[in-house]
Image (cartoon, helix red, strand yellow):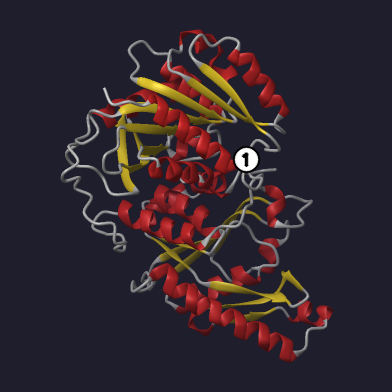
């Protein structure tokens, strides 16, 4: 596998596209899977994010095989060779197109609401998907951008077949793929986690991107002002507030949510190749929010830094930034009295434990999900915060590392094995077990000072 998930792919693609920042581009993600990738690119480039609505026309008896694509503004692309080889009749093609056109219209309303599409006339447009297979969808997207007046089109993907540039020659002004493996068969084979992106995730990405750009506001979501009146805590933030945390010369992106009446806050330290938009950690954070806890999903590395594998595994650096983010949070109005917990995933668990072991650390509880506590081996005996180690039963190597670490912890601790779960807890129901266990651990140990 080349990429952990779409967030990892997006961050690595963003590192390649850095020079485009000077052109003030517009980034368009191809829903649904291309949007998480595009969100990382848009953030790195300081660019607006929109969707380029395209629907694949799948062969009726083999929907994953594209025989063409349709898009906004009446764009239509048909691969006559696939249609002929698949034996699809004109009537069958028309039926598939009618069905997909209805989906296209519905999703335009769902994703954008009343907001008009981002203007493209005279601008550099960066089209982003999670990968290219047959090229029909990408071709339709390029034609949509061209029809809307784009001055220059850059089609950028994490992975594509070796001859993809020949297939799409002339459709975009520049074609960029991080990897073109010789054994390419399908986009999903190059991702560890290729779970389907939901409509809610697409809408959430667009809202977060709108908040990040100066002078823009996200669509109203009915959550109110979030001023915390009457809860005794001062001002609090509405759900999913995007924040930027200065740490030395770096500015770390975060997603902060502080429910009314929160007594504790949990900071998330993500694993290698992941970030604050990780669907798994967002689901856990949502569960902790329902339990009345504030959450801060945090990128401990900037986008350029995340491309440096040495920094990704620099536990001391990551722990120092987690501690700095904790101090920032505790200095924030409405958060000063919150008890602090750390949730670490994979290599992020090592950073959480390292930070918790610091002298004077305010951390009152730690939860590790599929963690690598061995990367903080020298600090384990100094951890005083009660620690819960959550490991998948099928994640044999990591399970052994956590058993080894448990024997070196001197604090209150527990090792909980989620039977049948792998390293990513992608199996049905396993992430829900992680969320429930974490919520119980944190609510039991995070008591406001």
Residue at position x 57%, y 50% from top?
Answer: 6
The picture places residue 174, in percent across and down from the top left corner, at: 55, 61
For residue 417, what is the image quadrant?
A: top right
The residue where tag 1 is placed is: 425
Quarter containing the N terminus: top right
Q: In terms of depth relative to the viewer, which is nearer, 48 or 351?
A: 351
Q: Is residue 368 above or below residue 3?
A: above
Q: Quadrant of residue 332?
A: top left
Q: Quadrant of the C terminus?
A: top left
Closer to the camera, 154 or 366? 366
Q: For this view, does 292 lie left or right of residue 59?
A: left
Q: Is residue 321 among the parts visible in the rendering? A: no
The image position of residue 364, as x and y in percent, is 38, 21
> Residue drawn at (60%, 10%), measured in percent from left and top?
407
Q: Is residue 442 visible?
A: yes
* SS category of the residue bearing label 1: loop
Q: Is residue 129 above or below residue 362?
A: below
Q: Residue 167: x percent and y percent? A: 69, 68
Q: Position of residue 8 (x, y in %)?
A: 55, 44
In the image, what residue occupies the spot 56% across and 57% down?
197
Q: Residue furthest bottom?
A: 91
| Residue lying at 36% horizontally and 23% vertically, measured from the top left | 323
| Numbered disc total | 1
Give 158 or 243, whichever is nearer the viewer: 243
Mark 1 neighbour class, 10 Å CA radius: few under 14, some 14 to 19, many 20 or more: many
């Amino acid at each position: 596998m080349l990429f952990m998930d779409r967030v990892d792919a997006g961050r690595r693609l963003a590192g390649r596209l850095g020079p485009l920042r000077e052109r003030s581009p517009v980034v368009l993600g191809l829903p649904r899977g291309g949007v998480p990738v595009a969100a990382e690119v848009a953030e790195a480039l300081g660019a607006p994010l929109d969707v380029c609505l395209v629907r694949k026309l799948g062969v009726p008896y083999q929907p994953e095989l594209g025989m063409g694509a349709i898009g906004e503004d009446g764009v239509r692309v048909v691969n006559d060779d696939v249609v002929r080889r698949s034996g699809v009749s004109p009537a069958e093609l028309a039926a598939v197109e009618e069905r997909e056109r209805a989906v296209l219209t519905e999703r335009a309303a769902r994703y954008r609401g009343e907001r008009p599409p981002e203007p493209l006339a005279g601008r550099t447009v960066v089209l982003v998907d999670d990968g290219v297979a047959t090229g029909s969808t990408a071709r339709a997207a390029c034609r949509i951008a061209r029809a809307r007046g784009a001055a220059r089109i850059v089609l950028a993907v994490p992975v594509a077949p070796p001859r993809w540039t020949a297939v799409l020659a002339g459709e975009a002004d520049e074609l960029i793929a991080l990897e073109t493996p010789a054994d390419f068969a399908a986009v999903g084979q190059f991702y560890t986690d290729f779970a389907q992106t939901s409509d809610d995730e697409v809408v959430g990405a667009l809202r977060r991107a709108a908040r990040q750009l100066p002078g823009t506001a996200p669509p109203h979501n009915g959550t109110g002002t979030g001023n915390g009146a009457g809860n005794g805590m001062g001002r609090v933030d509405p759900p999913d507030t995007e924040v930027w945390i200065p740490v030395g010369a770096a500015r770390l992106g975060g997603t902060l949510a502080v429910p009314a009446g929160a007594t504790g806050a949990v900071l998330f330290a993500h694993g290698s190749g992941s970030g604050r938009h990780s669907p798994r950690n967002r689901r856990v954070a949502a569960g902790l929010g329902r339990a009345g806890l504030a959450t801060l999903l945090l990128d401990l590395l900037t986008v350029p830094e995340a491309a440096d594998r040495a920094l990704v595994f620099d536990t001391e650096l990551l722990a120092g930034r987690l501690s700095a983010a904790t101090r920032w949070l505790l200095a924030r109005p409405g958060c000063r009295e919150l008890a602090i917990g750390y949730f670490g995933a994979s290599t992020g668990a090592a950073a959480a434990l390292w930070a918790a072991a610091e002298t004077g650390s305010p951390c009152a509880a730690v939860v590790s999900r599929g963690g690598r506590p061995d990367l903080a081996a020298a600090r384990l005996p100094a951890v005083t915060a009660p620690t819960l180690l959550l490991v998948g039963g099928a994640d044999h190597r990591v399970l052994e590392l956590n058993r080894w670490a448990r024997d070196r912890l001197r604090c209150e601790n527990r090792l909980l094995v989620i039977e049948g779960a792998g390293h990513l807890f992608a199996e049905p129901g396993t992430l829900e077990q992680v969320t429930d266990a974490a919520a119980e651990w944190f609510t039991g140990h995070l008591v406001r000072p």
